[in-house]
Image (cartoon, rainbow, N blue to C red):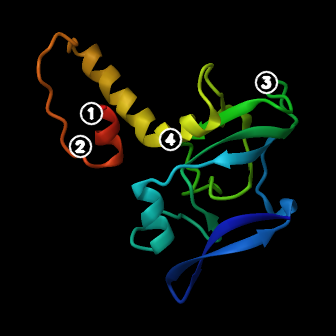
Amino acid sequence: MFKAYITEQSEGQPHTTLQELDQPRLPAGDVLVAIAYSSLNYKDGLALTGKGKIARSFPMIAGIDLAGTVVESSNAVYNVGDQVVLTGWGIGERHWGGFAQYARVKAEWLIPLPPGLSLLYAMALGTAGFTAMLAVLALEAHGLKPDGREVLVTGASGGVGSVAVA
């Protein structure tokens, strides 16, 4: 048994509750991850409150990212004890996400935890940090250099903008 925030829909309205589930209820995948952390993103807030049409099917576990430790794997790339991060791939939207104690996912969705990062720090940066990094890399690819010029960041009070400013 494990705990998860399950969003279900009744009478056209999503509602989320903390439930205990059996591991066989987890969807198919070749890696089982014990989730240590998931970050709370704007999209997750929309999914949990039913304010946006984020979840594509029900029941759904929200959480568009996660960091944890592999506890089972039938894929040669990942072994029990490996620490991993997952962001994207439709988790929390089309596939059960990170607001649970366990996730069963496809190995190709995972990346090994980068050296020097803890699971906690990986999710402190989370999807917002990853997105901010992609934005900065795109700016650099278009010729922007850190030479003291000012850069305007819109939405700097949000998740991506606040990480980009930092």
The local secondary structure at tag 3 comes to loop
The local secondary structure at tag 4 comes to helix
Q: Which mark is residue 77?
A: 3
Q: Residue at 69% of width from left, 46% of height from top?
A: 36
Q: Quadrant of residue 26?
A: bottom right
Q: Earlier in the sequence, mark 4 or mark 2?
A: 4
Q: Can you give x and y, in whole percent of width and height, for residue 16 in the image? A: 58, 75
Residue 136 visible in image: yes
Q: Earlier in the sequence, mark 1 or mark 3?
A: 3
Left or right: residue 150 versus residue 68 is left
Badge 3 density bin: few <14, some 14–19, many ≥20, Cα 10 Å: few
Amino acid beneath label 1 = Val
The local secondary structure at tag 2 comes to loop
Residue designated by label 2: 156
Q: Work out whether residue 119 or residue 155 is closer to the camera in this orientation and state it.
A: 119
Q: Quadrant of the N terminus?
A: bottom right
Mark 4 and 2 residues: CB-CB less than 8 Å, in contact?
A: no
> What's the distance in space between the residues labelled 4 and 2, CA to CA?
17 Å
> What's the distance in space between the residues labelled 2 and 3, CA to CA?
38 Å
How many numbered dots are placed on residues in this image? 4
Mark 1 and 2 residues: CB-CB less than 8 Å, in contact?
A: yes
Mark 1 and 3 residues: CB-CB less than 8 Å, in contact?
A: no
> What's the distance in space between the residues labelled 4 and 3, CA to CA?
26 Å
Q: Residue furthest bottom?
A: 11
Q: Earlier in the sequence, mark 1 or mark 4?
A: 4
Q: Work out whether residue 91 or residue 116 is closer to the camera in this orientation and state it.
A: 116
Amino acid beneath label 3 = Val
Amino acid beneath label 4 = Ala
Q: Nearer the viewer, mark 2 or mark 3?
A: 2
Q: Quadrant of the C terminus?
A: top left
Residue designated by label 1: 165
Q: Work out whether residue 20 or residue 78 is closer to the camera in this orientation and state it.
A: 20
